[in-house]
Amino acid sequence: MENVIIFILFAIGMFMVIKGGDWFVESSVWMGKVTGIPNVIIGATIVSTATTLPELLVSTMASSQGYYDVAIGNAVGSMVCNIGLILGLLAILSPAQSIQKSFFTRGCFMLTTVALLLAFALDLTITKLEGALLLIGYVVFLAVNLWEAKKSYKKPSSDPNNDALSSKPFVKRNVLLFIFGAAFIIIGARLLVDNGVALAELLGVPQQIVSLTLLALGTSLPELVTGVTTLLKKEYGLSVGNILGANILNGLLVIGLSSQFTQSGLMISIQTATTSFGTFNIPQTVRFDLPIVLALSAVLLLGGLFFKKINKVIGGALFLIYIGYILTMLMVFI
């Protein structure tokens, strides 16, 4: 009976995340249209912040309880999932999209964030001071977004369509969609995480792997749902901006704030890796997970710079790296 309840709650969580994502994207696109702010800016600020809330809640709660593997694994695993799985699939399934100047700004910001995380993690501890520096980086990121939004602001035109969008009924409707969409995403993702982890524990899956796969995928479902929804609505700039912003927030806000809920910082544990060359004890986060995030970020940024667009080639490369990462992790660390 308990197992049946877990499955039911998992299904409810899936429905809430999907429906909430649809409402949230619709209201966010409306914000962009009535304010004149580009979709990529909306995606990298409002949408990415709200869709990162599941990671933030899970990681801070985990770190406060001393589950550092869960706190770090959830954030880093979500970064891998966001770029490799979600953005990779979106790039494969959607038409090639020309990149904007803001893409390079956020791409460089994301690459710098990952490199900074890797440097901080080399001593196997992300201290509270280092976490505070990450939080300062988050404030800088928001400031850059606000500056770009102000710079690219366009006064909404006075055509009848925009006037209708700004009418009281439309404003009320979209504000409610925004609020309930965000709430559904957060609550639904939490149901998915809690009951997904419970299902994994029944199967005896290790905590570290749960955090990097099932937990990361669960908390990344908002990005996946909003990405698929924007693909269907042909709002491509919103999904790319959302994913770039979400990854930056995972590195700066989620890990930075999680470190503040510890006594002396986030401790990185040692895992056993079994290969054809023997068995080794290594810090998986430092030697495997973060380098993969760095590689994915570099492929995305350099690929966009070379092709001047996000196309199926870049998407295919990102997706293959993600599949290779999951397969290697399952074969080596279990």
Image (spheres, grey):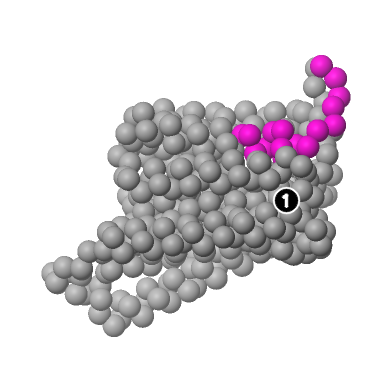
User: In the rendered structure, which amino acid carries the disc numbered 1?
Assistant: Ile
The front one of 164 and 132 is 132
Q: Quadrant of residue 281?
A: top right
Q: Is residue 316 left or right of residue 2?
A: left
Which one is in front, 158 or 308?
Answer: 308
Give the residue at x 48% y 53%.
Answer: 245
The percent coordinates of residue 175 (x first, y second) are 40, 76
Magenta span of residues? 277-292
Give the x, y percent position of residue 70. 75, 52
Task: Tell me the residue at 45%/43% (across/down).
Answer: 107
Q: Quadrant of residue 17?
A: bottom right
- Pointer 1: what residue? 126
Instruction: Give the x, y percent position of residue 333.
Output: 79, 33
Q: Residue furthest left?
A: 159
Question: Do we see residue 103 in this rendering?
Answer: yes
Quadrant showing the N terminus: bottom right
User: Would residue 14 be counted in the magenta stretch?
Assistant: no
Seen at 78% across and 37% down, the residue is 283
Please, which residue is most extreme toward the top here?
277
- Horizontal and vertical percent position of residue 219: 62, 55
**Is there any visible trace of residue 2 in the rendered image?**
no
Residue pictured at 31% horizontal, 45% vertical = 100
Q: Dot 1, crowdedness within 10 Å: few (<14), some or many (≥20)?
A: many
**Is residue 278 highlighted in magenta?**
yes
> In the rendered view, does 160 fall on the left or right side of 73?
left
285 lies left or right of 223: right
Q: Total number of numbered labels?
A: 1
Q: Quadrant of the C terminus?
A: top right
Residue 23 vertical placement versus 280 (above, below): below
**Tag 1's secondary structure?**
strand
Picture layout, residue 151 above or below residue 220: below
